[in-house]
């Protein structure tokens, strides 16, 4: 569930960045009573991830641009989050104060385009692993400040979320193990270190450990970990890793996963495949906000 506060904070920061002292053009050109209608239109096929951004941008822009008590522009979503659409589809309709609509336009588009790009790319990855039982999950490789929204967009595309922050879960990476073993792998040191780690944790906390060689698995599994991450391994090596784990832990694959390779990785038998590209490589989807302004009676424009 995406906290409303996360959307509101991102939108507020974006509006402040885009119009720190108001919208000089719109405020000089159009009077406060001018109304506008707008349509959010798809310029290409995709999957929508609005996650409340459009409504939040219009609501906050109205509070900044309109007279006190003016109702914010009404938003009617015609396509739901996670729903596919085709080029030319009208995704949403907006009606309200022209000053608010025009002030919110670029911020709303920047965010919805970005998030829908993440959802669309995620849906493509999910389609490649269909019927394998493998889940596509994201990583912490997110845009600073946009993590909560981008992770919601991954869910819109049918993907799952990995840990959100370093505080959420225990994940022992290769650099942790390098420090633990002073740069040289030692099975006994690794097993003992992971057991001591488990002893310090609540019983509800799962432990995931990354390995980059199959000969490291025995020491890790001996500590009773919950998930092993096989990093940068080809499908054949992943298959051998799954066999070696033998159901004693969940198996995650990661490292350089591409749309062209994720299917073969999933068919190796891994339970999860984490893909940094979902948020790192997603393009912004081409969407437009087509605005019409009703000039009203003479003298209302400025």
Image (cartoon, rainbow, N blue to C red):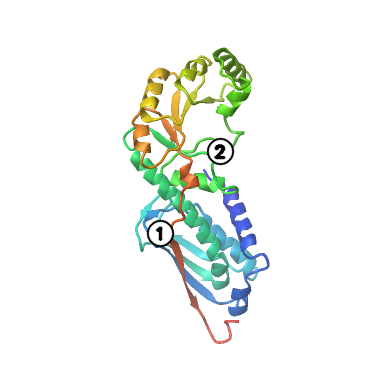
Q: Are marks 2 and 1 in contact (CB under 8 Å)?
A: no
Front-most of residues 267 and 94:
267
Q: State the residue at coordinates (47%, 23%).
A: 213
Left/right placement of residue 302 relative to residue 228 reads right
Q: Nearer the viewer, residue 99 or 258?
A: 258
Q: Residues within 10 Å of mark 2 (few under 14, many from 20)?
A: some
Q: In the picture shown, does residue 70 fall above or below 14?
A: below
Label 1: state its secondary structure.
Answer: loop
Residue 173 seen in the current view: no
Q: Is residue 177 visible?
A: yes
Q: Residue at x 41, y 50 (%)?
A: 120
User: Counting residues from the N terminus, which is met first, the one under dot 2 or under dot 1?
Assistant: 1
Check disc 1 and report the residue beneath it. 78
Residue to which mark 2 is pinned: 164
Q: Is residue 29 above or below residue 218?
A: below
In the figure, 215 relative to 1: above or below?
Answer: above
In this view, the residue farthest toward the front is 184
Q: Residue 87: x and y, percent?
A: 35, 61
Q: Kindly give the residue lying farthest to the bottom in the view shown.
A: 298
Residue 190 % position (x, y): 57, 17
Which residue is the extreme one toward the right? 21
Q: Is residue 175 left or right of residue 232?
A: right
Q: Residue 261 is drawn in which quadrant? A: top left
Q: Nearer the viewer, residue 273 or 39?
A: 273
């Amino acid at each position: 569930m995406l906290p409303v506060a996360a959307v509101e904070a991102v939108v507020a920061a974006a509006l402040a960045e885009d119009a720190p002292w108001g919208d000089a053009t719109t405020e000089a050109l159009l009077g406060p009573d001018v109304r506008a209608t707008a349509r959010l239109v798809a310029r290409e096929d995709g999957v929508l991830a609005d996650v409340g951004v459009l409504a939040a941008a219009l609501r906050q822009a109205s509070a900044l641009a309109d007279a006190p008590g003016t109702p914010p522009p009404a938003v009617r979503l015609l396509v739901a989050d996670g729903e596919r659409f085709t080029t030319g589809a009208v995704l949403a309709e907006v009606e309200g104060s022209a000053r608010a609509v025009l002030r919110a336009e670029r911020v709303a588009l920047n965010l919805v385009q970005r998030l829908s790009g993440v959802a669309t790319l995620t849906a493509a990855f999910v389609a490649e692993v269909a019927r394998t039982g493998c889940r596509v999950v994201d990583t912490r490789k997110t845009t600073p400040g946009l993590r909560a929204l981008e992770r919601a967009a991954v869910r819109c595309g049918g993907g799952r979320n990995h840990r959100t922050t370093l505080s959420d879960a225990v994940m022992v990476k290769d650099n942790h193990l390098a420090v633990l073993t002073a740069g040289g792998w030692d099975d006994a040191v690794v097993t003992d270190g992971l057991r001591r780690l488990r002893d310090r944790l609540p019983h509800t906390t799962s432990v995931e450990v990354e390995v980059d060689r199959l000969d490291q698995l025995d020491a890790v599994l001996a500590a009773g970990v919950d998930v092993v991450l096989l990093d940068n391994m080809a499908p054949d090596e992943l298959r051998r890793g799954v066999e070696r784990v033998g159901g004693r832990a969940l198996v995650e694959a990661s490292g350089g996963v591409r749309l062209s390779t994720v299917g073969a990785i999933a068919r190796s038998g891994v339970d999860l495949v984490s893909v940094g590209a979902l948020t790192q490589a997603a393009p912004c989807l081409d969407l437009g906000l087509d605005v019409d302004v009703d000039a009203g009676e003479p003298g209302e424009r400025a």
